[in-house]
Image (cartoon, helix red, strand yellow):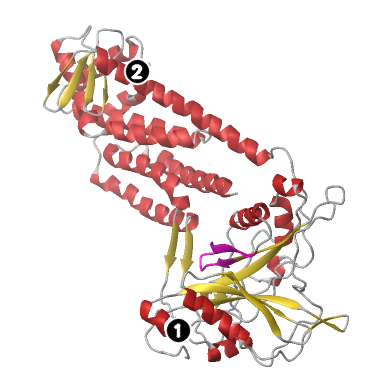
Amino acid sequence: MAFVSYIVKSGIILIVLLIYYEIVLKRQTSFKLNRFYLLGSLLFAAGIPFIHISYPFFKEVSPINILSSPVTNVLIDGEISVIPQTGVGWGQYFIYFYLCGVIIFSIRYFHFWYHIFKLFSILPHKKIRGLHIYLLSSTIPTFSLFHHLFFNPQGLDKKNRRKIFEHEKIHIRQWHSLDIQISEIICIFNWFNPLVWIFKRYIIQNHEYIADQQVVQQFQASGYLQLLVYQTLKGNTSFRNYFSCSNLKKRVKMITHAKPEKSKYWNYIPVFLISSVLFFCSTSIAIGTSESPATDLSSSLPVVKDQTASASLPLQTGETKDTEAVFPPGNVRNWINQHIKYPVEAIEKKLQGTVIVAFTIDEAGKKQNVSISQSLAPSLDAEALRLVQSMPDWKSAVKDGKRVSSSFAIPIHFRLSPAQSSETSVPEKKALSKAEEMPRFGEDVTQWINKHIRYPAEAQAAGYKSKVYVHFIVDKNGDVKEVELTHKSPHEVLNQEAIRVIKSMPRWESPGKVEGKPVNVSYTLPINFLNNSPGYPDGKG
């Protein structure tokens, strides 16, 4: 999907810029400006879709940030049955086809350089004023490559030799070969896009216009035109096609065209406006980021139910409307079912069970801190991580009119069909991740943790900051049991404090219930320790 998005974005940029060149700039005689426009268009289209920009106007962070209220290990209602897949999908065939094209055009490119280096080794040459001049004795026409001039004097008198020498010297002094090599490389990786080949042809054509325009300022135009006709009709042009233009009619027209007028320079002014519009339409931009204070962050870690995201997580419609993160493709469970693959190793070992993956959607909608919150088996853990990491970008949450990050925990249930399974499963904890009636705490859990958490003095002094995930069970009596870390901090003092504060929680007001009967319910709670501000030696804000 990312590759298709890149193709679409770069294609739109090239189409818009090519249309403007064809309609407005192509007939202008400001060839040096056209040179920068053409090469800049290729680079712009090739690079801009990759750019991500974030404008953080301000960031309000308290010294202790306990992110979120209790969150169950539920992102998707219902079980996701992962059907083992075999064979190669169309997406992989597409990648193979693309790579074959890249290889073919790379071979073509390196084959050209092979012949160039072969000429370096067999041709006599001499260095004059920084130019390496090689004398050609075959039918290969004169051409230049960087500071190397391959000169064929056959059939030319002294005056015409001088004209050709000056022509190629302009190419060398103005580094036209660099433009060609850049466009060649872009064409290799965009070989399927005809627009990049059109831009490359126009770049080569414009180089010839530049050289022709400057040569006729030193020599009579009529004599130079006769020389062009002679050179065009002379011999093999296979090498020359890389570095010159064979469209004689257009070159003649440009040579005889009137000189550029300053009043026509205004045609280049709209280029900045067009580029700005394309830039903001093609880049990923996040504007206005902030983090909420530690007093109440219950909305920063939502539980997404099994329903289309556009319905349950509405898009922002006003500057100050609070919204949760949105998964653009729609139903998260359906997307997972379409893209997940059951590892062959797990099938052979008949492994099945649940993996919980924790991750954060940042202000730009990008996935960050993807990690395993509840492990199952290495192969299944790896597939769950791959799946979440391959998700397309989300639309970030909005709080108080500003983009904010939000954290999620998504359980992925691996289940084999009866024919594939002999009921060999990885043991799981005897606790539900969701109950008909969830446990109730006596007060807001986030506020309780904010009041009782203590930022270790050692951690404050050392500037430690990290996020930990604490997994625990609220049993049938409402007591907190089996407290453990599923994602640890590299700083042990923070791990110990996270465990301490959860273990010190009082009995919950009521346990979870199914059909009116108490049940054990498991939770995963992310606690984010931030140490960006002074003060609060005991961790209380």
Q: Report which residue position mark 1 lands on.
A: 456
**Amino acid type, mark 1:** Pro
Density class for disc 1 (Cα within 10 Å; few <14, some 14-19, many ≥20) is some
Determine the secondary structure under disc 2: helix
Task: Please name the predominant secondary structure of the magenta segment in the image.
Answer: strand
Residue 254: % across, % down: 30, 29
Depth check, mark 1 against mark 2: the one in front is 1
Looking at the image, residue 306 sits to the left or right of residue 68; the answer is right
Q: How many marks?
A: 2
The answer to whether residue 371 shows anywhere in this view is yes
Residue 354: % across, % down: 73, 62
Residue 532: % across, % down: 40, 79
Let me know if residue 360 is in the magenta part.
yes
Residue 191: % across, % down: 50, 33
The answer to whether residue 331 shows anywhere in this view is no
232 and 496: which is toward the camera:
496
Q: Report which residue position mark 2 lands on.
A: 115
Vertical comparison of 47 with 367: above or below? above
Res 116 → quadrant? top left
253 and 458: which is toward the camera:
458
Looking at the image, residue 504 sits to the left or right of residue 143; the answer is right
Vertical comparison of 294 with 145: above or below? below
Q: What's drawn in magenta, residue-wise? A: 359-374
Residue at x 22% of width, y 7% of height: 154
Let me know if residue 370 is in the magenta part.
yes
Residue at x 25% of width, y 12% of height: 122
Vertical comparison of 285 with 107: above or below? below
Mark 1 and mark 2: Cα distance apart in space:
68 Å
**Amino acid type, mark 2:** His
Determine the secondary structure under disc 1: loop
Res 108 → quadrant? top left
461 and 190: which is toward the camera:
461
